[in-house]
């Protein structure tokens, strides 16, 4: 270990306080491998000097960069496939029938990372439910990290990133090759609004939601934070609306006011009717 125990614990506490991400005691290697490049970038000769700066300076952009560096941004287009099949075959057709009168639909991708998740949804809608483009359709995508949201807004992806989950037919239809990268068409980009929201902080005013996708982020939080987030999500969900979690996440034993709903191999959650 490069960091002393107090330095390591300082970083763990900072990350916990600012993001609710729990770094277990065995995550020393992760902290060091994520923060060493940052230390070099900001001109600190060692990781210990970086931590020293954090400890003596009042909270500033450097602390924020450390927290962002400790987030895991792993994502892909149409991640896990089945949730998107469930959206296409069951959830969206049902919601379209139910919301026909108001012609309004709001979706929130919380913790959207570099944008593949909300853009997958936007492409899915464009492909299968073009009538929604004439509705008051809002896809809100949020994340804690300013850096990852800047990437998401840019919607420029490497060959490796588009190879993960995006069918070739959709790649050529919705992306343009620029150098070695692929840029998403502006009309799809424009379907998604990106905004900073720290799930562990007070949330800004958010509209009532028809679909909330909060996938592969609760796993990083402790039980109390998961509970608080699910209570807040529940308050935002309209009647007959849907919550999607990551494959390793559940509401079970965390918030029993949700019930699990399965459409073929897609699992989602709805608020239990009392
Ligand atoms: C593993 S990615 C999941 C991306 C996408 N939802 C998916 O399933 O592919 C987790 C994301 O959660 C974000 N995150 C971590 N802590 C957060 C917090 N407290 N508030 C908001 N976003 C957070 C990270 O910045 C990261 O982009």
Image (spheres, rainbow, N blue to C red):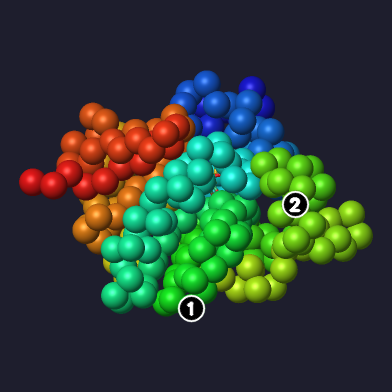
- At mark 2, the secondary structure is helix
Residue 134: mark: 1
Q: Position of residue 234 (x, y in %)?
A: 24, 52
Sequence-earlier tag: 1 or 2: 1
Disc 1 secondary structure class: helix
Disc number at residue 45? none
What's the CA distance linking mark 1 and mark 2?
Answer: 24 Å
Residue 201 in the image, given as x and y percentages of width and height: 36, 56
Q: Check the picture and name the quadrant holding the N terminus.
A: top right
Residue 130's image quarter? Answer: bottom right
The residue that appears at 27% across and 58% down in the rendered structure is 237
- Using the image, determine if residue 231 lies above or below residue 59: above
Q: Please name the residue shown 72% across and 62% down the image.
A: 174
In this view, 172 is above or below 50: below
Can residue 118 be seen in the rendering of this structure?
Answer: no
Give the residue at x 48% y 51%.
Answer: 88
Residue 81 visible at all: yes
Instruction: Give percent across and percent down for residue 21.
Output: 44, 40
User: Relative to 9, does residue 115 appear above or below in the rendering?
Assistant: below
Residue with the mark numbered 2 = 169
Q: Is residue 243 left or right of residue 174?
A: left
Q: Residue 52: give x, y in percent of width and height.
A: 59, 44
Please tell me how crowded label 2 is: few (under 14), some (14-19), or many (20+) other residues with Cα within 10 Å. Answer: few
Category of crowding for the residue at label 1, using alpha-carbon neighbours closer than 10 angstroms: few (below 14), some (14–19), many (at least 20): few
- Seen at 41% across and 41% down, the residue is 245
């Amino acid at each position: 270990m490069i960091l002393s125990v107090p330095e390591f614990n300082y970083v763990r506490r900072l990350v916990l306080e600012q993001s609710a991400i729990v770094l277990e005691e065995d995550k020393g290697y992760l902290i060091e491998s994520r923060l060493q490049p940052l230390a070099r970038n900001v001109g600190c000769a060692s990781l210990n000097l970086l931590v020293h700066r954090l400890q003596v300076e009042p909270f500033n952009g450097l602390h924020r960069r450390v927290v962002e560096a400790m987030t895991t941004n792993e994502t892909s287009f149409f991640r896990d496939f089945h949730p998107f099949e469930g959206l296409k075959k069951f959830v969206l057709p049902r919601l379209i029938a139910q919301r026909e009168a108001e012609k309004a639909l709001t979706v929130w991708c919380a913790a959207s990372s570099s944008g593949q998740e909300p853009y997958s949804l936007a492409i899915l809608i464009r492909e299968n439910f073009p009538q929604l483009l004439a509705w008051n359709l809002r896809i809100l995508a949020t994340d804690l990290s300013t850096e990852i949201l800047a990437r998401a807004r840019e919607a420029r992806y490497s060959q490796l990133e588009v190879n993960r989950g995006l069918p070739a037919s959709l790649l050529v239809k919705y992306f343009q090759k620029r150098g070695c990268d692929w840029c998403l068409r502006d009309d799809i980009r424009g379907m998604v609004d990106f905004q900073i929201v720290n799930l562990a902080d007070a949330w800004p005013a958010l509209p009532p939601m028809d679909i909330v996708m909060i996938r592969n982020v609760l796993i990083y939080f402790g039980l109390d934070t998961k509970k608080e987030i699910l209570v807040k999500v529940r308050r935002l969900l309209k009647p007959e609306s849907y919550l999607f979690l990551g494959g390793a996440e559940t509401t079970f034993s965390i918030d029993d006011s949700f019930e699990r709903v399965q459409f073929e191999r897609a699992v989602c959650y709805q608020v239990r009717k009392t």
